[in-house]
Image (cartoon, helix red, strand yellow):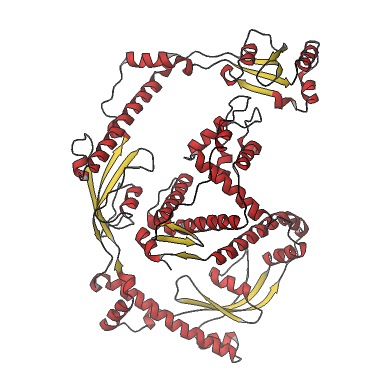
Amino acid sequence: MLTTVRNAVTGFAGPFLIVLVILAFAFVGVPELRNFTQRSALTVGDEKFETTDVRDEFTRQVDYYRRQTGESLTNDEAVAAGLLDATIQTLTARSVIQQEAARLNLTATNEMVGDYLRSEPAFENPNSGEFDQEVLIAILQNNRLTLEQFREEIAFEILRDHLLGSIGVTTPAPTAWLDLQLKRQGETRQVSFVSLTTPAEAITAPTEEELRGYYEANSDDYMAPEYRTFSAVILRNSDFAQGLERSEDELRQLFDSRKALLSTPETRTIRQLTYQTAEEAQAAFSRLAGGTRFEQLAEEQGFPLERVTYEGVRKDDLSDPTLANAIFSETDLGEPIGPLDGLLGYTVAEVMEITPGQEAVFAEERDALEAELTENETSRRLFEAVETIELARDQGATLQEAVADLPNVDVVTYGPVDRNLFTPDNATLEDLPVEILNEAFLLQEGDESQVIDLADDTGYFTVSVDQVRAPQLQPFEDVRAAVRSAYMKERRRIQTEATLASLRNAVSGGASLTDAAQAAGATVTDTRVSSQANPQNLPQPFVSTLFDADLGNLVSAWADDEVTAYAGIVRDATFPAMPQQEQLIELYKEATGQQIAVELQQAYLAELQNELTVTRNPAEMDRLFSFGTE
């Protein structure tokens, strides 16, 4: 989170510190743990997480993924992408750290949070070098964070750094260890291997009884998914912008009221130094008037010239009116200004550059003003529609009744459809936003959602679930072809396993790999493999197995098709000389040391997790996501 915040820092808001946000932290109390109901989906030690906690974090993970990639995911796709696992890991790790910190009496006080803000370079104004409230507020808005949420994030970061900082101190990795790792990367292995498979024609065609028996024994593989029928109302901004026209008089009035804001103000590049006493400031002013360079005065105060130089300063950027009026008065470039008795001391300054302002022109601003008025009126209409729907439903109206009198608003019924947008006849449901589908599969039959933002920020939606059809076993005749294919694949694998076992027994009994392969009807191939070369395109699981094997031992692995087995023996291993090995070792020392530190921290957290006991409630997880939990 803080990485995202730091990367977002931009802009200039004047040379003076505005401390409202820091002061606000002093009055923010540490939030108490929520009271959890007994329907916990996840338990970490003494802390319990309701299904709503898991769902909210899962939604944040999905939303973050969408903002990073621009892709929307269904629930199934999000889980397949690992976002549910990431959700559980995030909640677990956070809880483990907080509970261990509490056990050790570690805390992040409000003063520590304030100190963090003041000392963190990411929150400094690039020109003034001081904390900038406007930048922080913009960051909070862009990341949809409240002040309290941000405070909690910083407090957690402080606790985590205190707790883990001493565990995983980064030190360069040992040279001897890195030497072995680099040799392994360049290692080449001489391999003799054989591939074994059973062709489909070698398997006796299954009988009807055998197919039905396989179908019944593996019925979970032939379940039709859950299907849902639901009704949705989509309120898009574009639907409420129809028929909006703005008169020229209305646009002119808005322009006149905004002219000062729309105009580009004069800006100046200035240099300034502030002294504690009037005598010091007067002496500095006299030296400037006598020809001393401003750079020399800055160096005497311990500042480089760029630290006391501010570019593009507007008059209203300066919160000290005395300073603002003097700097923006009629003055020659480079002429000393001061001493000025200001809010923070006695200031001397000089103006280095003046960029004239530019007055706004109605013709240039007209289209933007019209778009703004249209957007405002569209938003008003949209929010009125939302309020109408919510009020009607609060009074017991159905979704259809709630929108009956709203223009350009219709209830659309979708389904039956599964979580992947497929209908029972395998057609794909088009033009349905994924977030509506996800919400429909989180509700119970007969439930209605609240009005929710569309993911692309073009409006809102609400959905009601009309019917839920539970997963059910598909008729045998409908899946007969799939059953036969799976049956044949299983029989082929079983036969190949038997052939592989015979090969192993023969080699164990003293036969050569060539003789054992010939008895199995296969041919031995010799090749060399390394991390960079695999001329025979051996399956990666088999290559990994070969590099874990001792010389002379027979090892095996399955190909991706799950019916072809590879078996082989490593004959020799060579480690070619690496002319730049010493340079590589130095290059990898720091990076590997950092990785070791991370792994130590992960091991520490894993041990804490084991001590606290982490349990997942399969029933609640299944109720929320409609997935079984191992």
Q: Residue at x 46, y 86 (%)?
A: 498
| Depicted 324 relative to depicted 88: above or below | above
Q: Residue at x 26, y 46 (%)?
A: 232
| Depicted 557 relative to depicted 333: above or below | below
Q: Position of residue 273 (x, y in %)?
A: 72, 21
| Depicted 276 relative to depicted 161: above or below | above
Find the residue positioned furthest to the bottom.
509
Q: Position of residue 451 (x, y in %)?
A: 31, 42
Q: Is residue 419 shown left or right of residue 530?
A: left
Position of the C terminus, as image quadrant, is bottom left
Q: Position of residue 534 (x, y in %)?
A: 59, 67
182, 15: nearer the viewer: 15
| Depicted 178 relative to depicted 569: above or below | above
Would you say residue 527 is visible in this rendering? Answer: no
- Quadrant in the picture for residue 209: bottom left
56, 112: nearer the viewer: 112
- Quadrant in the picture for residue 38: bottom left
Q: Is residue 396 shown left or right of residue 428?
A: left
Total marks drawn? 0
Would you say residue 132 is visible in this rendering? Answer: yes
Find the residue positioned furthest to the top.
330
536, 438: nearer the viewer: 438
483, 621: nearer the viewer: 621
Q: Position of residue 212 (x, y in %)?
A: 27, 79
Q: Is residue 214 shown left or right of residue 129?
A: left
